[in-house]
Image (spheres, rainbow, N blue to C red):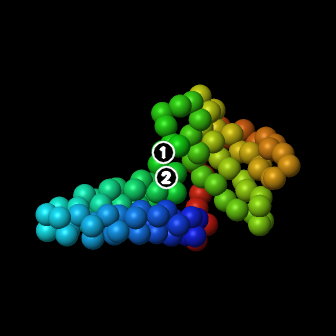
Amino acid sequence: MKKRLCNVLVGLFLPSAAFAADAAGHDGSLLSLLVPLIAVTMAMLAMLWWLKRGKALSGNGPLKVVQAVAVGTRERVVVLDAQGRRLVIGVTPSKIELLAELHAGDEPTKNR
């Protein structure tokens, strides 16, 4: 992910720097080119951070992840709210399996 981000940033800055240097020779306004470039770059970084945190995927749909706990390198136990039902599922790379269905008043407890 970091390597891809670095490649994008290098692709953005190097051609822009050459264009900015050429444009600066004509009208002397390097700052007028750098401010929008920096603003667009910051917006892209903010969007990447937002997508990485998973905010784009958490909608108002029928499934909501209440809690997820890693129990191995690629295995997880996940508590879901699914249309009023609270489900505990096990997720592995090869399958997803229903482990239990909790009662309506049950809340998952966090380990301390």
Classify residue 30 as left or right of residue 16. left
Q: Residue 56 carries which label?
A: 1
Mark 2 Cα-neighbour bin, 10 Å: few <14, some 14–19, many ≥20: few
Mark 1: which secondary structure? loop
Residue shown at 81% from the left, 43% from the top: 97
Q: Quadrant of the N terminus?
A: bottom right
Look at mark 2 in the image and give the residue it sits on.
Answer: 51
User: For the residue marked with disc 2, what is the amino acid?
Assistant: Leu
Nearest the eye: 71 or 4: 4
Q: Do the residues labelled 2 and 1 touch (CB within 8 Å)?
A: yes
Residue shown at 51% from the left, 69% from the top: 6
| Residue positioned most to the front | 26
Residue shown at 25% from the left, 58% from the top: 36
Classify residue 39 as left or right of residue 67. left
The answer to which of marks 2 and 1 sits earlier in the sequence is 2
Residue 99 coordinates in the image, percent (x, y) = 79, 45
Residue shown at 47% from the left, 48% from the top: 55
